Amino acid sequence: MPVGGLAHRATDNAADLVVRNAKIHTGDAIRPQAEAIAMRDGVITVVGDDNDVAPYVGPDTKVVDALGRRMIPGLNDAHLHVIRGGLNYVLELRWDGVRTLRQGLAMLREQAARTPKGQWVRVVGGWSAEQFAERRLPTVAELNAAAPDTPVFVLHLYQAAVLNRAAVKAAGFTRETPDPKGGQIVRGRDGEPTGVLLAAPSALVLYSTLAKAPVLEGEDRKTSTRHFLRELNRFGLTSAIDAAGGFQNFPDNYSTVVELAKAGQLSLRIAYHLFPQTAGQEIDDLRRWIEVARPEDGDEWLRLNGAGENLTWAAADFENFSEPRPELSDYETEFEKAVRLLMENGWGFRLHATYDETIRRDLAVFEKIAADGLFPAGNRWLFDHAETVSADSLDRIAALGGAMSVQNRLSFQGEAFLSRYGPGAAADAPPLRAMLERGLTVGAGTDATRVSTYNPWIALHWLVTGRTAGDLVLRPPHNRVDRRTALAMFTEAGAALTGEEGVKGVLRSGFLADLAVLSEDYFNVPEQDIAHIESLLTVVGGRIVHAAAEYEGLEEELPPVSPAWSPVAHFGGYQATPATGLSGARQAELLGQAVSESEQHRQWRARRTLDLQPSNTLFDPCFSL
């Protein structure tokens, strides 16, 4: 857009993009605040004010006026299943942000009518029954009524799935189908499957059933991934650490992001992990990967970050908080082999660990290996989740050179956790302040897409307020963090977890040009409205990858959503809701300011004989004769 006061001056060193007139939170202690930023060749060249960037404005420089809005460093989700999410995004009906089950069922009914024969309607994560006004799951009968003939699969966290009659048939469930290990197929009095699947406590029954649905192929996988990345850009995300996960095979399921990276079509930087998928074969898989790759292989767009989030299946503690904590069998022997193999070969790792009981067992293995000098040894490693980690375990993690990555899983499962473990445990789940007080690097993420939503502002809201999606306060003030700390957990800490703290996470000259201009000022909106923030302008590597409001049309063009019947083509992704509005006190304050301004305007008119009404006379046209 035309911007006055910045004439073309630069020639050889002209910036590609300048964003000015912004309230910039740089995250840089040397210069915390700024008003303008210039970028060239994907890197920040200047952070300052108009005078600082003016010498770098050339005839081809794109200059964007932020209109006084808040700018922040690009967000980095430290635990996101972005590769798996991208492969399936356009096939999924997202209930993220939907406020009523009635609306969700209406969306499902409409989508079923356009879904072709042989395809499924799937609602896979990003929502909780507690976010609905009805505070409940859909029933099998409601799914049957909404879609009599089209298979429907609705996943609720890692707790349960609800299937309609057509999906039960498509999945091949019958009276004779045995319950899988750690899961339950709920049956009626006649022994037939009802359509409800329970994780008891393993989520494998949910995953394996979803895996029976049709998948995308070829170019549709690329298109789906590009639209998912654009959806993440919508919220100001510029980087993510892919935590791998079940049913994400290497290299097959990674090939799409590899091809997009080669073509320069990624709009999100991805650091990925490798997760051995076959129980009993984990050590062999790790050994093969170690022979052909090393962490940090790649570039700033796509890079290997290590192994995990599981190293051996037997060591995984599933986090269905509606069920008791799983009692794990002896796993230490194979687990030690995996950890020792990784540390000896310079590979870092991350570990899914929900409960302190699991963390203590893992730490005992690490301490044994530390006797051989392998902890700490410069390899990055961390625990994920850690809702019930103890103070003693945190001390041991710090001594071994570890880090933490926390996710807002309790935004969606908080009520179940509270019901099982009580308010005391819920107040410290996870113990954020205790982690930070020990000097641990603590990255923040979402664990999207099959539990939490991928919207990072829901997670930031949870970090700051301690509230669930159902507006229940779990964490008291002593275990919350302020807004600056929460943002640093989504920027600087994420960069540190991938060894990139020297090139991203703050807005500084020489750092990667990753930033977001926000719809609302994160530092000044009421706490409840943090969850409603989006990005209006997202820049990754100096490229505008998302643009909305006044900036619409500046972003890179994407191919249309394919297939055409995709839920994303009709409903989009996250279903945004309006902010809750001002508090009563703030509203009254603003009204007072408006009244004052109105009186000043009246006096101005009176001084210029434009106001014919006496200043001390009340006039109401309803009572005029």
Image: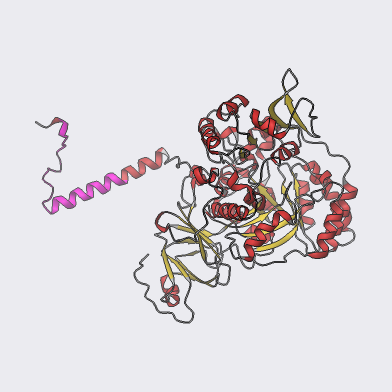
Q: Nearer the viewer, residue 86 or 433?
A: 86
Quadrant assignment, res 349:
bottom right
Q: Nearer the viewer, residue 609 or 39?
A: 39
Q: In what quadrant of the picture does the N terminus appear? A: bottom left
Q: Is residue 196 left or right of residue 523?
A: right
Q: Residue at x 85, y 62 (%)?
A: 344
Relative image position of residue 337 (x, y in whole percent): 88, 54
Residue sitting farthest toward the front = 117
Q: Is residue 216 left or right of residue 22?
A: right
Asked if 378 appears above or below 565 in the picture, the reply is below
Is residue 242 on the magenta stretch?
Answer: no
Q: Residue at x 11, y 32 (%)?
A: 624
Tell me how the rendering is colored: secondary structure
Give the residues in magenta.
593-622
Residue sitting farthest toward the bottom = 12
Relative image position of residue 218 (x, y in whole percent): 64, 54
Relative image position of residue 479 (x, y in whole percent): 63, 44
